């Protein structure tokens, strides 16, 4: 299948073309401003599907709205009319408004529908809300892109009205919905009348203040070690977006190592709903732990060296010590249940490295940790 994408170098276009290029038996024809009218005519005459993403949203002259949105759409459809193929139009929620941009997008929608009615080709008209995600141009027409870009570089951002609301959709959801239309064509979708204005789901309605405050928590991660709740779809996607704007020399950040003559203990990340992850380094012959918990529970994974993890049940005065041998040569998780005092000893000749997970972030006010030798 030959698929023509107009506006291929734009934000949505780059993400869509990458997804299409990974599909078997799909050849992507990428059209943008640096291509010629002859190339467009050739590709329009040989393609099997068109994703029409090209348009104007920040013109130097308002007249460019009509030529870049409505006019170019009509030119493209005239080329396609010779051998009608399905067309997906990326429009905007502003098509419902009477500003110059909205009027030009609505006229482009009408042209696509008329093409579908004349030719019987399937058409898909999407009115997109504010799209956010990787590769969106900052300081252009996306507040989210600008805020993520600026805060990732330590720059201030301005918000005039924190209570103002905005509806957003994520780029991966947009691309997934667009690609599904290829399958609909294969399933026999025909004609403009059968397809109403389409939207991408899920969408998220947030105040500007909510978005900015969430981004600020991402900025603070190297100090707090907190990562957002990945069950929250919007937080998960906004966090991914923020990370994509990090300067390439700032992908890493240092951690605080708590070191003594026994080795070191370093927290890696914190989550409000899934606890914390740490790495523990024990020197040869060193025993660590010697404590128990009422409710807190942990998982230990030795990834280098060899040793033993020992347990003794706290409510049984006759309880025997239970020993688990551990080694980086055979990765296995040892669960640390509540009610068992436990320790971990390095039995090797090199440092032993253990990745540790606890179900809650350590709270010095409520530590739930009580010293007791195994």
Image (cartoon, rainbow, N blue to C red):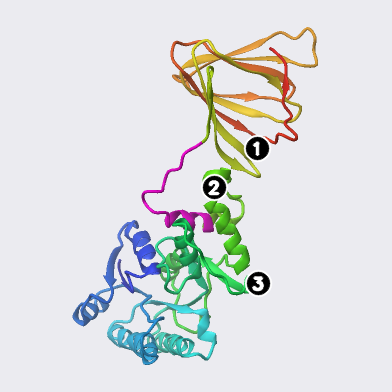
Is there CB contact under 8 Å for labels 2 and 1?
A: no
Q: CA distance from mark 2 to mark 1?
A: 14 Å
As helix, strand or loop, the secondary structure at mark 2 comes to helix
Would residue 119 appear left or right of 284 to someone viewing this image?
Answer: left
- Quarter containing the C terminus: top right
Task: Depth check: give the residue in front, 47 or 125.
Answer: 125
In the rendered structure, does residue 327 fall within the stretch colored magenta? no
Q: CA distance from mark 1 to mark 3?
A: 32 Å
Q: Which residues are magenta?
A: 238-255
Residue 205 in view in this figure: no
As helix, strand or loop, the secondary structure at mark 1 comes to loop
Q: Residue at x 47, y 71 (%)?
A: 142
Residue 220 in view in this figure: yes
As helix, strand or loop, the secondary structure at mark 3 comes to loop
Decide which of tag 2 and tag 1 comes sooner along the chain: 2
Residue identified by numbered label 2: 221
Residue 111 in picture, x, y percent from top left = 41, 89
Task: Depth check: give the residue in front, 243 or 167.
Answer: 243
Residue 114 in picture, x, y percent from top left = 42, 89
Decide which of tag 1 and tag 3 comes sooner along the chain: 3
- Quarter containing the N terminus: bottom left
Q: Quadrant of residue 336?
A: top right
Residue identified by numbered label 3: 163
Q: Which numbered circle lies on residue 349?
A: none
Where 114 sits versus 172, above or below? below
Residue 61 in picture, x, y percent from top left = 36, 90
- The crowd level at tag 1 (other Cα within 10 Å; few <14, some 14-19, many 20+) is many
In the rendered structure, does residue 245 fall within the stretch colored magenta? yes
Residue identified by numbered label 1: 361
Decide which of tag 3 and tag 2 comes sooner along the chain: 3
Q: Quadrant of residue 43?
A: bottom left
């Amino acid at each position: 299948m030959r698929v023509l994408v107009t506006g291929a170098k734009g934000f949505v276009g780059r993400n869509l073309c990458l997804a299409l290029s990974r599909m078997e038996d799909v050849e992507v024809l990428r059209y943008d401003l640096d291509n010629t009218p002859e190339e467009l005519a050739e590709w329009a005459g040989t393609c099997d599907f068109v994703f029409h993403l090209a348009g104007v949203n920040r013109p130097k002259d308002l007249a460019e709205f009509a030529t870049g949105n409505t006019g170019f759409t009509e030119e493209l459809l005239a080329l396609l009319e010779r051998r009608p193929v399905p067309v997906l139009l990326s429009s905007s929620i502003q098509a419902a408004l009477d500003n110059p941009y909205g009027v030009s997008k609505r006229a482009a929608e009408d042209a696509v529908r008329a093409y579908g009615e004349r030719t019987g080709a399937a058409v898909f008209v999407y009115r997109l809300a504010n799209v956010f995600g990787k590769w969106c141009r900052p300081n252009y027409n996306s507040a989210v892109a600008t805020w993520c870009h600026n805060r990732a570089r330590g720059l201030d951002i301005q918000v005039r009205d924190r209570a103002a609301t905005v509806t957003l959709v994520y780029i991966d959801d947009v691309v997934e919905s667009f690609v599904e239309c290829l399958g609909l064509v294969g399933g026999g979708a025909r004609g403009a009348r059968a397809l109403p204005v389409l939207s991408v789901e899920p969408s998220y309605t947030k105040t500007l203040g909510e978005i900015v405050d969430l981004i600020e928590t991402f900025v603070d991660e190297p100090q707090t070690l907190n990562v957002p709740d990945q069950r929250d779809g919007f937080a998960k996607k906004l966090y991914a977006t923020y990370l994509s704007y990090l300067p390439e020399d700032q992908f890493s950040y240092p951690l605080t190592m708590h070191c003594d003559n026994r080795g070191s203990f370093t927290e890696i990340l914190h989550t409000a709903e899934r606890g914390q992850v740490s790495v523990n380094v024990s020197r040869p012959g060193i025993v660590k732990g010697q404590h128990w918990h009422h409710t807190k529970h942990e998982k230990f994974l030795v990834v280098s060296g060899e040793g033993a993890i020992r347990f003794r049940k706290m409510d049984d005065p006759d309880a025997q010590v239970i020993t688990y041998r551990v080694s980086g040569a055979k990765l296995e998780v040892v669960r640390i249940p509540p009610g068992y005092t436990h320790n971990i000893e390095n039995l090797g000749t090199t440092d032993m490295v253990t990745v540790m997970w606890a179900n809650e972030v350590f709270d010095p006010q409520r530590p739930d940790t009580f010293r007791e030798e195994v």
